Image: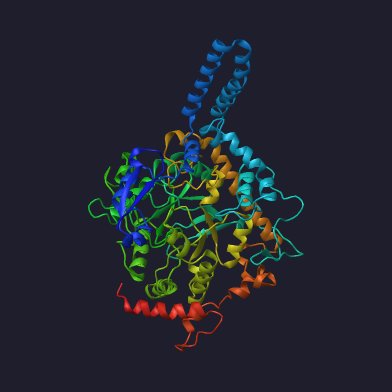
Amino acid sequence: MQRLVHLRWGLSSARTRKLIHINPNHCRAFSFGVHKEVKDEMLKENTLKPKHREMSDAIENWSRKSFYAVGTFGIGGVLASFGLYGGSFSVILAVPVGLYWYQGLKDMNQRSSSVLYNFPVLGHFRYLLEGIGPEIRQYFVESDNQATPFSREQRAMVYSRSKLQRDTLPFGTRRDVYVEGYEWINHSIYPCHVPDEHRRVLVGGPQCKKPYLASRYNISAMSYGALSQNAVKALNKAAKMGGFWHNTGEGGISPHHQQGGDLVWNIGTGYFGCRCPETGGFSAERFVETIKANSSVKMVEIKLSQGAKPAHGGMLPGAKVTKEISEIRGIPEGVDCDSPPNHAAFSGPRTLLKFVQTLRDLSDGLPIGFKLCIGRPEEFSAIVAAMKETDIYPDFITVDGAEGGTGAAPPEFSNHVGFPLTDALHFVQNTLVGAGVRDKIKVVCSGKVLSGFSMVRNLSLGADICVSARAFMFSMGCIQALKCDTGRCPTGVTSQDPELMKGLDPAVKFHRVYNFHHKTLEQAFHLIGAMGVSDPDLLHPGLVMRRTSGGTHAKSYADMYPPVDSNYLSRMTSRKDTITTGSLVESSWRKGKQLLQSRPN
C-alpha cells in the first residue's frame, strides 16, 4: 500500500510542491533525505532555502543601489502625500526621508568605515547593536570571552589598536583566573628593556647567501583571490611602512602585492608563478623569471600543508579564472585548475630537501623554508633525519596550528585534522633540539596569534617569529561575518565584488594595519621586559603558566612540555623504552628513521 505525502518547501512556488508516492517499506530511507530527482530540481530552483533566511538575505544584498531605490521611493511618497493630504502631512513625512538621504550620502562620501560605505544608513544598525551588545550579553547572553573563532574582547582589542583608540582595561580583568585553561606569565621584580637589536631576527642558515632581517610579527599566507585587491594593497603598503613581511599565499604574486613591502613567496602544489603550462608541475625557468621580476621577494616558502585544511587540495572553477588570474597564476583562462593535496616536485624527505636546495640555488641564495601542519609526527622526524643525512637544511620552518583558518574547508578537516599549535610547536622545537639542528633553522609559528601575550607564549615555547592572517584582517575592518567563502564579505576584505571592494580604501586601511602591528609588537616587548628578559631568544617554557586539573592546580609549560637536551636523539640507544620526558619525540624519531630507511626518496 502506498502513502501520499505532500511536501511544501521554501517559497510559495508551484514548482516547490511535489506529490511523491512512497512505499511504507521505504519510509525509513525517505526519512534521511528527499528523493534525488525532487531534491535536484528544488536545488536548481533554489527553493530549499529556509524562510528564516529571507530577512538576512535582504540585509546582505543591501547596497548603494538599494539606498537610491528606497530613497527615490521615499521622495515619491512625499510627493504623493502632498497631492493627497496637503502640506502638513507631507512635511512630517519629508523629515525622515530627508534625514535618510542626508545620512546615506554622508556614509557614501566617507572612507573610514567599509560597512557604512557598502551599506549606507543600514550599516548604522550594526554599530547600534554592537554598542548595546555588552549590556545584552551581560544580562541575557554570554561574556565577552565565549564567542568563537575570536571573542569580542579579542576583536575589540585589534580594532582599538588599529584605530589608535584607548585599549586599556578598567576595573581589573574580566577573566576567571581560577578556571582551567587560564594562562599568565611569571614577571620579575627586576624588569628590563628589550633593545632594538633583539627585536628582529636574521633568517638564513649557513647555506643561505642572502639572509633576511625579519620582524618578530608578520602577515601570514593569504592569496589574492581569497582577499580582494584592495585588501592586498593595504597589507603590502603597511608591510612597507612597518618593515615586516607579507606572505603572498599560494595564489602567486599579483600586481597588487607590488606596493613596496617585503614579500614571502608561498609556493603550493599548483606552483602558481612557477608553473609548467604543459604538465602543471614545477618550472625552474618560470621560477627564475618570477624571482628576477620581483625584487621584493625576500624569502620563499614551500607549502606542504596548512592548519585550516591539512592534506586537502582544491579546485579553482574555470568561471573564476579571469584574464588577470590567468596571467598571475600562469594557467589557461576559463579552465578549471586543480591544486592537488600533494606536490609533484618531490615525494619524500630527501627529495623535499633537494627541492629546497634547488630553489636556493635558482634564487641565488634566498632563504628557503617550508610550511606544514603537524599530522603524523614520524613524518616530520623523517624530514629532520634526512637533513642530517643529506646535510641540506631549510632556513626556516613555519608551523601552522590546526586552529588556523583563513582557508575555507569541510568541517571534518577544520575541526578534527592536525596538531593544534601549542602541541605542534613543542614537538617541532624538541625534535630540532634533540637532533642537534635547531641552531641552523628558524621556527615560524601561526595559529590565532593576535596579542602581545600570544606572541610571548609562542616565543617561550620555541618560536623565533610569529605570523597571523585573521588578526590583520580584523585590522582592516573584518567584522567576523563568516562569509569569506561566499563572495559577500560586507567589508570588502574577502570579496571580489567591485561594489563591496570599494568600501575598503587601501589609503586608509594600511595605516590601521601598521598601527595594529606596531602596538602589538610594543606590548609583546613590554611583557618580555616585565619578565626580566632582554632578549626574546632567552625566553623558555618555564616562564609561562597554565591552570590545569579543573582549575585546582597550575603548571608551567616546562612541566607540561618538558624541554630536551641538545643532540640527545643522535646519542639515543636502540632500547625500546620511551617512557621519558621526551617520549613522543623519541618514539617519533625511531619511527621516522625507519620510515626514511624504507623510502628511496
Query: Could you tell me how many numbered marks the image carries?
Result: 0
Furthest-left residue in this view = 278
Q: Is residue 550 above or below residue 256?
A: below
User: For this view, does 139 lie left or right of residue 536?
Assistant: right
219 vs 477, nearest the viewer? 477
User: Which residue is painted at 59% across and 38% down in the image?
Assistant: 126
User: Which quarter of the rendered picture does the N terminus lie within?
Assistant: bottom left
Q: Is residue 29 above or below residue 506?
A: below
Query: Which residue occupies the extreme front position in the image?
Result: 1
**Camera sees residue 553:** yes
Q: Residue at x 76, y 64 (%)?
A: 190
Q: Residue at 58% across / 42% down in the picture?
A: 512
Q: Quadrant of residue 551?
A: bottom right
For the point 58% across and 67% down, the residue is 461
Q: Give the percent coordinates (x, y) of residue 353.
A: 37, 67
Q: Nearer the viewer, residue 37 or 444?
A: 37
- Residue 212 x, y percent position in the rendering: 49, 55
Name the quadrant containing residue 50: top left
Residue 195 visible in rendering: no
**Along the line of sight, which residue is nearer the eye, 139 or 460?**
139
Place of residue 52 in the rendered image (x, y in percent of width and height, measured from the top left): 49, 43
Residue 62 against residue 100 in the figure, above or below: below
Residue at the outermost bottom position: 575
Above or below, 256 relative to 458: above
The coloring applied to the image is rainbow
Q: Position of residue 430 (x, y in %)?
A: 52, 73
Q: Nearer the viewer, residue 583 or 207?
A: 583
Name the image quarter holding the C terminus: bottom left
Tell me where residue 393 sits by quadrant. bottom left
Q: Is residue 449 left or right of residue 335?
A: right
